[in-house]
Amino acid sequence: MKSQLILAAAEAEEHNPLVPEWIEVVLALVVFAILFFAIKKFVVPNFETTFAERSAAIEGGIAAAATKQAEADAKLAELEQQLSEARHEAARIREEAREQGAAIVAEMREQAQAEATRIIEHGKTQIEAERQQAVTSLRAEVGSLATGLAGRIVGESLEDDARQSRVVERFLAELETANAADAGKDA
Amino acid sequence: MINAASATVRAEEFHAPGPSLFDLPGIAGSEVTKPMVQLFLAAIVVFAFFYAASRKRALVPGKLQFAGEGAYGFVRNSVARDIIGGHDFQKFVPYLVTVFFFILVNNLFASVPFIQFPTFSRAGMAYALAGLSWLVYNGVGVAKHGLLGYLKLQSVPSGVSPVMYPLLVPLEFFSNILVRPVTLALRLFCNMFAGHILLALFATGGLYLIEHVGGIGYVAGPLAWVLAILVSFLEILVQFLQAYVFVLLNAMYIQGALADEH
């Protein structure tokens, strides 16, 4: 082994290191080519798809977050819209109720007014009717009383005052009893 | 190590490790050498890592997937996308990822215990990748602009008086078409080659100092080993940087070939 080494060394002493061994040139190219195709076929596509998938995942995540944000914003706007609508509705209803209340009060007042007027009217008519009735009955009675009284006056002698006053008193007394009898008949 | 062996055989004089350090014999007497095996090993390591990391395709990555995405995303975003840009960059990502991690792992092999050999210190392997880069960037340029359009793009600088063309056109052609693959290959190869020689020098030199010099050698030898450890860390940085520079220049050449204006 040792002598072999020395032999090789001595032989190689003349070999210029810059002059290539052609077998090594070819071998280096072949091995490089094999490695190149192996890497191109089995390694690069894997890494590139991983990179692409990763950036797609990140971009997708960002896009999804943006969509969610937009959705939330839309929902918020919608809720605010609904809230303000509800506020408007409430205000409108209050206003309506106030108007209705006022209308009801006015109506009631009018009704009461009408009722009062009606009652007063009724009272007035009744009074009028009763007065009319009283006048009618009074007129009839006054007539008969006057003729009765006149007959008495004419039938009796009217010379002395004592007699005259007696007559009047008797008349009045009769009148009273007649009145009392009338009242009892009416009742 | 060969030189440790030869040093003990030749006893007294110290032979600094040279280019012969990189001419390894075939494993078990075959034609297959260690750097050849390392090429396959690097391919397997890179693919296994990325396949395991990308297989689950989880939206929330685990530790392994996170590491894989970080490594892949480093080349994809800060090299391919930032330099090539636009929508074009995606189709160069597999190529650039393969270039970066294949070179990186092969370079790091120089610092992995029991492997400890940078694959690209074999010039042929560096030439292979540089030649491939040349084909790729010129290929996409010709495909986009046509052969003449592409040659014009790479050789005729815009905003320069035509009077200067006789001087500038050959220079631009030389620098953009001819020199680039050479510099790509040599930069990678020389860094790996020199780094490995440097480490071997510190290691074998330290051993020689202790074994054959004596006296001050007992101090200087261990000191050389300490330096070897420090240089190892520097080398790890260089290994990463060379892979990064290689893929960065690839991306810039592709971008230049696709550009509308030079």
Image (cartoon, rainbow, N blue to C red):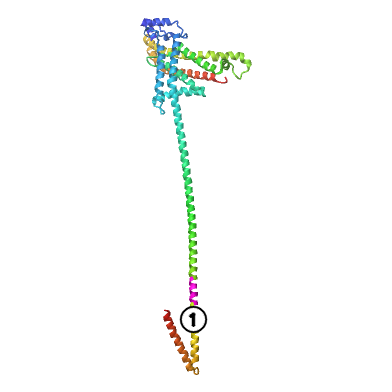
> Quick one: B42 or A166, which is closer to the camera?
A166
The residue pinned by badge 1 equals A138
Q: Picture coordinates of residue B89 (x, y %)? A: 50, 22
Residue B145 magenta-drawn? no
Residue B211 visible within the image: yes
Quadrant assignment, res B156: top right
Quadrant assignment, res A43: top left
Quarter of the image where the N terminus of chain B is located: top left
> Quick one: B260 or A131, which is closer to the camera?
A131
Q: Chain of mark 1?
A: A
Residue B122 visible within the image: no
Quadrant assignment, res B196: top left
Provide the secondary structure element on which disc 1 rests. helix
Label 1 crowd bin: few (<14), some (14–19), many (20+), radius 10 Å: few
Q: Picture coordinates of residue A119 (x, y %)? A: 48, 69
Residue A129 magenta-drawn? yes
Residue type for callout 1: Leu
> Outermost residue toward the right?
B163
Q: Main secondary structure of the magenta part?
A: helix
* For residue A140, above or below residue A67: below
* For residue B161, above or below residue A66: above
Q: Which residues are magenta?
A: A122-132
Q: Residue at x 47, y 12 (%)?
A: B128
* For residue B55, above or below residue B27: below
Quarter of the image where the C terminus of chain B is located: top right
Q: Residue at x 49, y 13 (%)?
A: B131
